[in-house]
Amino acid sequence: MNEGVISGIGEINGLKVSIACMDFNFMGGSMGSVVGEKITAALERAIEHKIPAVVVAISGGARMQEGLTSLMQMAKTSAAVKKMRLAGLPFISVPVNPTTGGVTASFAMLGDIIISEPKARIGFAGPRVIEQTIRQKLPENFQKSEFLQECGMVDVIAKREDLKATIFKVLNDII
């Protein structure tokens, strides 16, 4: 891959979807201008074709090497999610381990339904940074998908090998 995300239109058990999948092996899955453009394009393609969108997020956050351009992708991708909502189309977000920083603070936690894997770390800042800032010990499993599900921030937890079937079932239930 020459960038941190791949996207296109595909099918899940015959159901047409616009999909984007981030790759942690490319610069830690960081979101720079190209990643933001591709995520936005995937959501806009869903609107154009009147189909659901699925984004699998895995990221260390915003791509620091790109500075402000990288941070602007947070607003751009969030605005694209809003357009999906206005179009009445479902957006399924699948944050996996790890999904952190600006990706968590933007599109990854804005899904109509959020599906994650067991024990996935999802958060903005790391737990050590938070503990040092607030000078308190964090709860056990803080920022893990199970903790976030208990707090109402993750809807479904499914093992990776079950994600396809889980996404299909969720989409069938809401379409």
Image: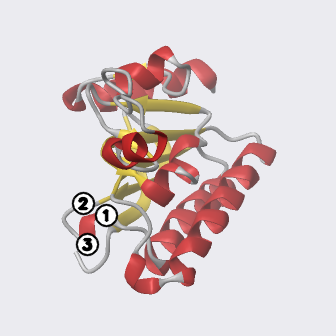
CB contact under 8 Å: marks 3 and 1? yes
- Residue closest to the eye, 58 or 51: 58
User: The N terminus is located in which quarter?
Assistant: bottom left
Cα separation, mark 3 vs mark 2, equals 7 Å
Position above or below: 54 against 151: below
Residue 110: where, in percent of width, then height? 61, 42
Circle number at residue 113: none
- Between disc 1 and disc 2, whose residue precedes? 2
Q: Name the amino acid type tagged 1.
A: Gly
Q: Is residue 164 left or right of residue 82?
A: left
Circle number at residue 27: 3
- Residue closest to the eye, 102 or 2: 102
Q: Name the amino acid type tagged 2.
A: Phe
CB contact under 8 Å: marks 3 and 2? no
Q: Which residue: 74% across, 44% down? A: 85
**SS at circle 3:** helix
The residue labelled by disc 2 is 24
Position above or below: 60 against 108: below
Circle number at residue 29: 1
Residue 46: where, in percent of width, then height? 60, 54
Using a 10 Å C-alpha cutoff, classify the residue at mark 2 as few (fewer than 14 neighbours), some (14 to 19) or many (20 or more). some
CB contact under 8 Å: marks 1 and 2? yes
Q: Is residue 49 left or right of residue 122?
A: right
User: Quick one: which residue is furthest to the top in this view?
Assistant: 150
Position above or below: 122 against 72: above
Cα separation, mark 1 vs mark 2, equals 4 Å
Using a 10 Å C-alpha cutoff, classify the residue at mark 3 as few (fewer than 14 neighbours), some (14 to 19) or many (20 or more). some
User: Quick one: which residue is furthest to the right in this view?
Assistant: 86
**SS at circle 1:** helix
User: Quick one: which residue is furthest to the front in this view?
Assistant: 135
Residue 30: where, in percent of width, then height? 36, 67
